[in-house]
Amino acid sequence: MEEYDYIATDPVDIRVGDEVTFEFDNTGELFHDLNVVDPGGSTLARAEPVAPGQNASVTVLFEEEGIYRLSCFVDDHFIEHQMFTFIEVTDPEA
């Protein structure tokens, strides 16, 4: 099942105002991309699809708290294989 998983290699602690670069290594056998989707459903950033064995990165400035989704929109990866994960962005003042 690892073909369709995002696996964090470092702890995730993201706060409003943080600029984060997501780097991903495609260790699977298919093309994959990475999309950062805000709590309202809009795509904030997208890394183009990469081939197996390749890597890519995308940088996002988080301006509001909430639950964000990291998703792969290549082919049926999102719908059929549920290739996504969630991250929470918190307010540093709270």
Image (tube, rainbow, N blue to C red):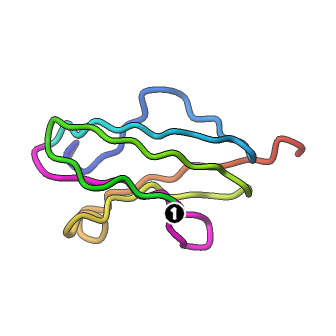
* Direction from residue 53 to residue 23 in the image, left or right: right
Residue situated furthest top in the rendering: 10
Question: Relative to 55, does residue 67 appear above or below in the rendering?
Answer: below
Disc 1, SS = strand
Look at label 1 and name its amino acid: Val
Which residue lies at the image location 51% right of the left edge and 63% below the top edge? 37
Question: Relative to 34, does residue 17 appear above or below in the rendering?
Answer: above
In the image, residue 30 lies in the stretch drawn in magenta: yes
Residue situated furthest left in the rendering: 29
What are the residue bounds of the magenta stretch? 29-44
* Direction from residue 6 to residue 61 in the image, left or right: right
Point out residue 70 in the picture as x, y percentages from the top left corner: 45, 54
Which of the 4 image quadrants contains residue 13?
top right
Point out residue 82 in the picture as x, y percentages from the top left corner: 32, 62
* Direction from residue 91 to residue 56 in the image, left or right: left
Which residue lies at the image location 23% right of the left edge and 69% below the top edge? 80
In the image, residue 2 lies in the stretch drawn in magenta: no
Check disc 1: other Cα within 10 Å, few if <14, some if 14-19, many if 20+. some
Question: Relative to 85, does residue 75 appear above or below in the rendering?
Answer: below
Point out residue 85 in the picture as x, y percentages from the top left corner: 44, 52
Quadrant where the C terminus is found in the figure: top right
Question: Relative to 83, does residue 1 appear above or below in the rendering?
Answer: above
Q: How many marks?
A: 1
Which of the 4 image quadrants contains residue 38?
bottom right
Which residue lies at the image location 17% right of the left edge and 52% below the top edge? 31
Front residue (pair 46, 80):
46
Point out residue 73 in the picture as x, y percentages from the top left corner: 30, 65
Residue that numbered label 1 is attached to: 37
